[in-house]
Image: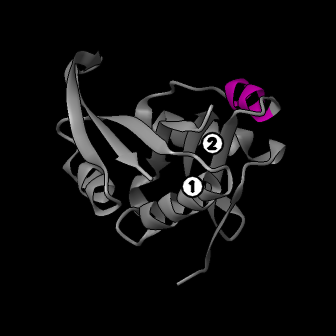
C-alpha cells in the first residue's frame, strides 16, 4: 500500500480539495473558496495525500481558543484505511500547539461512521440542530470535545 502523508493545504491543493468536496458533499466549496480560506489566519486545512494526490481533508477554524470543524471529506475509495484518524491526529496536534480549549462540530445524525470516529477521539453529543442539512434534509448531531 502506498504511504499516506498529511500536510497543511497548499495553493496547489485547492482544485483537488474542490474535487473531493464535489464527490463527498456535492460541491459545497469551489477551488476559490479553498484559496480564500488559505489567505485567512484562522482557517486550517490538513490534507491527506497518496502519491501526491489529495484523497481527503479536514478543515477547521480556531478563534479565541475554540475550534470549529468545517468539513472532513475522504474520497469513498480511500475510506476505512485510517485516513480519518490521521487527519484527526494532525488537527489535534495543531489544536494543542495553539492552546485551544475545545472543539465543536456538526455531523449528520445518520453518519454513524463519522460519529464513531469522533466518539473515539472523546467527542460527546451536546445537542441536535433540526433540519441542519439539505438534500436530503436531516438533523445534525452537535458534538464537542473539551481539552
**Residue 96's spot in the image, x, y percent?**
60, 57
Relative to 38, say whether 117 is above or below.
below
Horizontal side, residue 117 vs residue 97: left or right: left
Q: In which quadrant of the rendered view does residue 20 lie?
A: top right
Horizontal side, residue 66 vs residue 107: left or right: right
Instruction: Confirm whether the magenta stretch covers residue 36.
Output: yes
User: Circle 2: is it few (<14), some (14-19), or many (20+) Cα within 10 Å?
Assistant: many
Q: In which quadrant of the rendered view does residue 108 lie?
A: top left
x 67%, y 42%: residue:
44
Viewer-proximal residue among 2 and 84: 84
Foreground tag (2 vs 1): 1
Relative to 21, say whether 147 is above or below.
below
**Mark 2 and mark 1: span between their CA atoms?**
17 Å
Q: What residue range appears in magenta?
A: 31-38
Q: Earlier in the sequence, mark 2 or mark 1?
A: 2
Q: Any mark on residue 91, and which?
A: 1
**Residue 5's spot in the image, x, y percent?**
65, 70
Viewer-proximal residue among 103 and 50: 103
x 22%, y 40%: residue:
125
**Residue 50's spot in the image, x, y percent?**
62, 69
Residue annotated with mark 2:
17
x 54%, y 47%: residue:
58
Instruction: Identify the image's colour scheme: rainbow, by chain, secondary structure or one colour.
Output: one colour
User: Circle 1: is it few (<14), some (14-19), or many (20+) Cα within 10 Å?
Assistant: many
x 48%, y 58%: residue:
88
Amino acid at each position: 500500500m502506498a504511504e499516506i502523508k498529511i500536510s497543511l493545504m497548499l495553493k496547489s491543493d485547492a482544485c483537488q480539495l474542490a474535487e473531493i468536496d464535489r464527490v463527498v458533499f456535492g460541491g459545497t466549496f469551489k477551488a476559490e473558496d479553498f484559496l480564500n480560506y488559505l489567505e485567512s489566519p484562522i482557517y486550517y486545512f490538513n490534507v491527506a495525500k497518496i502519491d501526491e494526490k489529495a484523497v481527503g481533508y479536514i478543515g477547521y477554524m480556531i478563534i479565541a481558543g475554540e475550534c470549529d470543524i468545517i468539513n472532513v471529506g475522504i474520497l469513498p475509495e480511500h475510506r476505512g484505511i485510517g485516513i480519518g484518524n490521521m487527519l484527526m491526529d494532525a488537527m489535534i496536534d495543531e489544536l494543542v500547539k495553539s492552546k485551544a480549549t475545545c472543539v465543536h462540530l456538526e455531523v449528520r445524525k445518520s453518519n454513524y461512521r463519522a460519529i464513531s470516529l469522533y466518539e473515539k477521539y472523546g467527542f460527546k453529543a451536546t445537542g441536535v440542530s433540526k433540519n441542519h442539512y439539505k438534500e436530503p434534509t436531516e438533523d445534525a448531531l452537535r458534538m464537542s470535545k473539551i481539552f
